[in-house]
Amino acid sequence: MKLTFDRNELLQTLKMMHSLLDKSPKLPILKHILVTTTASHITLAATDLELGLQRHMAIPCPESCSFVVPADPVLEFIRELHAPTVQWTVDATHNMTISAGKTKAKFKGLNAQDYPALPAIPAPLLFSLPIGDLQDLLNETLPAVGEQTERYILNAIRFQMIDGATPSLQAVGTDGKRLVLTSRTTGVWLTKDHKTKTMLVPKKIGKVLKTLLANVDDTHIGIGLSANLAGFKLGATMLTSRLMEGQYPKHEGVIPQKTNALFTLPKLNLEDPLRRVSVISGRDAKPIQVKIRPTEILLQAVNVDMGEATESIEITSTRDELVTGFNTHYLLDALASMPGEHCQVYMDSPLAPCLLTTPERPEWHHIVMPLKV
């Protein structure tokens, strides 16, 4: 059986599949990609048993069959090809020859019978929104989500599809040391009988979604939800994820009440000095000292192995003086993901939560916990 692919479309699809595979999977078969052919299309699929990704490609096939191919070597080989089209020739024992122009390579495939079944997207789809809005929410939330933390539930992004006269999607992420709450008034319900829905999805699916959204031509994404599964549909691409279970931290009471901001300034006026000072704080993220005075912010980093750095930023503050400390990387993550050009900072005392907001997007709240210095 011979299959002919557009090289760019195939490469993009293989990259998508590869992005969710574990480097050391629980089962050897999970290092492979499942290929299913029908008379009208080819489907490529991959799973790590928690997430599943499928993509239909409108390529007619001479026969219907299923087989699996090794993800790493096939992706690397096709990445190095330059011909506009790529041919796969598959024999009865599932061995596959990939050819393009004068280049040819043979790969050992496997029977698909041992490949885990991928779940279907929960139907019907409940909610649809522009992919740009979901991209924004992921960009703003992902930096604060836990990464393999001891508290399992902190590895989740909390999404809430909120019912009302105008639907909205809210996203929350925290690792216990910082927290982001953000939302967009967006989307439409796709069913007549609907109400506010909440889902806890792994950070990994957030990263995969972010990659997918940057590489599709579709304008909207559909979301389906069941008791333990979330599904996302972008045209011919379908992503499913097991939902995380547990009690997500109550974030509403953590966000300080906004009264008068300590200061407001263009975020680049704070971000650039922080980057320079962070060179001294080093990779081990030693805290920097921050002195907020009526007319300036004084940043100071001291590292016994490297030296020290100081920088002053002109501001107009509502406080006489406040001296505190921060993990520089947390502040830089907050500023990099801020969806506006101006930064407002609220903080009541040296060890109180520090709230960053932006007047351009008042629904965005990023909290960073201070450190003793």
Image (spheres, rainbow, N blue to C red):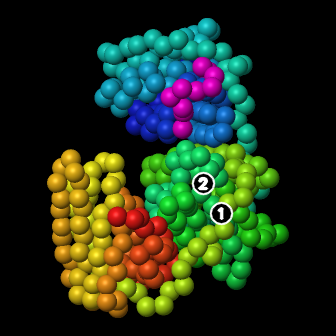
Q: Secondary structure beneath disc 1?
A: loop
Given the current orientation, which residue lies at the most extreme right position? 193
Label 2 is placed on what type of residue? Leu
Asked if 90 appears above or below 349 in the picture, the reply is above
What is the distance, in whole Å, between disc 1 and disc 2 at their CAs? 8 Å
**First to last magenta residue range:** 20-29
The answer to whether 197 appears left or right of 281 in the picture is right
The answer to whether 176 appears left or right of 317 in the picture is right
> Nearest the camera: 264 or 159?
264
On the image, the x and y values in percent for residue 56 come to 59, 39
On the image, the x and y values in percent for residue 42 come to 59, 32
Q: Which residue is mark 1?
A: 249
Q: Residue at x 79, y 69 (%)?
A: 194
Asked if 315 appears above or below 89 in the picture, the reply is below
> Magenta stretch containing residue 28, yes or no?
yes
Is the C terminus in the top left, top right, bottom left or bottom right quadrant? bottom left
Label 1 is placed on what type of residue? Pro
Q: Quadrant of residue 166?
A: bottom right
From where the camera sits, is residue 59 visible? no
Q: Which residue is mark 2?
A: 154
Disc 2: CA contacts within 10 A as few (<14), some (14-19) or many (>=20): many
> Nearest the camera: 328 or 43?
328
